[in-house]
């Protein structure tokens, strides 16, 4: 399944020698850099679990990965997280310059919507789902930056107590829902839409994706450890974070049990278990 | 018509007190700052000229204006044109900071596609048209930045002769087509699609928009004068620029004469004449 996704992403991007060359190379650098392709896999698995074919959802799957890629390109910018590295190599701005990185991110978002519009069934609904997620991701990022700024100020003033204050100030779950789970929810929803699933099934897949994304973000924080400046681990403690990962993973699995039809949900169940147990 | 567009844009944006507040205010600052609304007007006029109703194209019209707004927000960034002002007041990054401006631009692009997906007819085709234009604008901006950089280097070395060299190096018309005319072409095309016009009529509206956009960009350069560091005026001379404005304006008008149906094309003809004669 991953090879199919890699091939489709490769085909969706301009070749490295297409002008303007700097842009084409930046787009390929951003996308073809060895991501785990979790979101597009969820999209294809959801389409199959809904009784459809993976090939009907491949445009939606690529669209969600391109959207995810754009958010990473912009998150790494100096004015944002100022990360010079991504996946063990230079980030897009570190390699191609800030202006090209801003524009490459913009182009990836446009390309994501172009692909979503090419979905053979329910294209408009798939685009709307992607757009809703795209909006949520930005809101989550703004809230994350606000929380970080607030935390830095408060930490300077009052130390660890400040973390508790930030907890009250910022809805952690709401922020996680927007910055991470929204894309997972859209991935599963778009897959179900591509398979032309009935509305109640689409809603179930969306709930699966949301729960999976929440578990994913808590797991991310657990793996990052307490070094991260704004982490659920510091706010909630390790036990509570583990509890939430287990709860969300269980929710993701349970919601699939009540699906109509006879599509194969086992890959989605395995994905939930895999992500909850991951160490990467 | 402009009031209808202003109302629809206002309704499409989050209220100023919606959280995250900084984002909502930045979005409103970017969009509700007194643009001329040329592109959404073209979209609505095209829908009516194609025999449809303006209300069927209002989502597409707002989508094209939001996309245009996002490009301005990102163009103004320090890493791009580094403009602290826009329309006589602080640009988004100067007022809200760089990170918020990057994210506000991203959100506006997402919102543009969300609106396009809500078009009552031909939503997928309208999204695809918008996505194609969005991609072209980024490519045009990259080529523009490359040309500017090339020009700065060459100017330092060899003075005005360098401008001629840049002309050879960079396809000026291709750059104008991407960075300006693509959005005008999409505006007219999306209006025609919203009116469910037949394919040959859609193509004619697209040609109208393209020609109008080319004339608009040359007119822009004419109004900016020779102070602009990379201007068609310096490369081609005033006479040739005037000639091209007249030619493109004539093309825009002529293509409308051969339209099938009995829609009223006169507002589009007037728009072409107005833009060619503008002094703002």
Image (cartoon, coloured by chain):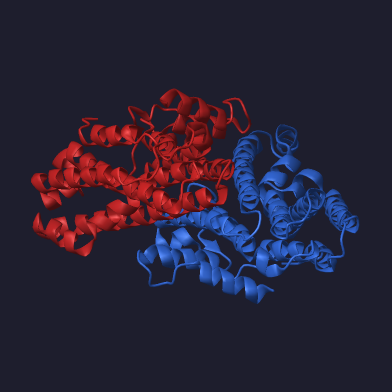
Chain colours: A red, B blue
Residue sitting farthest toward the bottom: B3
Q: Is residue B126 left or right of residue A203?
A: right
Q: Residue at x 35, y 30 (%)?
A: A36
Please determine whether, in this image, residue A261 is positioned above or below residue B74.
Answer: above
| Residue A74 figure quarter | top left
Question: Observer-nearest residue: A50 or A169?
Answer: A50
Residue sitting farthest toward the top: A3
Q: Is residue A46 left or right of residue B224?
A: left
Q: x%, y% of residue B41?
A: 70, 66
Q: Is residue A272 left or right of residue A57?
A: left
Q: x%, y% of residue B127?
A: 61, 50
Q: Residue at x 51, y 64 (%)?
A: B30
Residue B33 visible? The answer is no
Q: x%, y% of residue A158?
A: 10, 59
| Quarter of the image that includes the N terminus of chain A | top left
| Quarter of the image that includes the C terminus of chain A | top left
Residue sitting farthest toward the front: A261
Q: x%, y% of residue B277?
A: 81, 65
Residue A154 visible? The answer is yes
Q: Residue at x 72, y 53 (%)?
A: B189
Question: Observer-nearest residue: A198 or A13?
Answer: A198
Q: Is residue B67 left or right of residue A174?
A: right
Query: How many discs appear?
Result: 0
């Amino acid at each position: 399944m991953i090879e199919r996704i890699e091939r489709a992403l490769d085909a969706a991007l301009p070749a490295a020698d297409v002008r303007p060359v700097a842009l084409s190379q930046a787009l390929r650098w951003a996308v073809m850099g060895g991501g785990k392709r979790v979101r597009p896999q969820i999209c294809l698995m959801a389409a199959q679990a809904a009784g459809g074919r993976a090939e009907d959802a491949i445009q939606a799957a690529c669209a969600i990965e391109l959207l995810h890629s754009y958010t990473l390109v912009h998150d790494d910018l100096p004015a944002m997280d100022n990360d010079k590295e991504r996946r063990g190599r230079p980030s897009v701005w570190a390699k191609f310059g800030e202006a090209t990185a801003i524009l490459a991110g913009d182009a990836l978002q446009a390309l994501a919507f172009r692909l979503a519009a090419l979905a053979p069934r329910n294209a408009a609904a798939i685009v709307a789902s992607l757009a809703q997620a795209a909006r949520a991701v930005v809101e989550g990022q703004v809230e994350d930056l606000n929380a970080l700024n607030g935390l830095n100020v408060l930490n300077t003033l009052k130390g660890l107590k400040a973390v508790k204050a930030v907890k009250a100030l910022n809805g952690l779950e709401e922020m996680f829902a927007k910055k991470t789970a929204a894309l997972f929810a859209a991935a599963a929803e778009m897959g179900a839409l591509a398979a032309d699933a009935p509305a109640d099934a689409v809603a179930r897949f969306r709930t699966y994706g949301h729960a999976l994304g929440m578990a994913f973000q808590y797991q991310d924080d657990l793996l990052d450890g307490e070094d991260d400046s704004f982490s659920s681990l510091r706010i909630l403690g390790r036990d509570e974070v583990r509890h939430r990962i287990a709860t969300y993973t269980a929710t993701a699995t349970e919601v699939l049990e009540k699906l109509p039809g006879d599509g194969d949900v086992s890959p989605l169940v395995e994905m939930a278990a895999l992500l909850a147990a991951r160490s990467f």
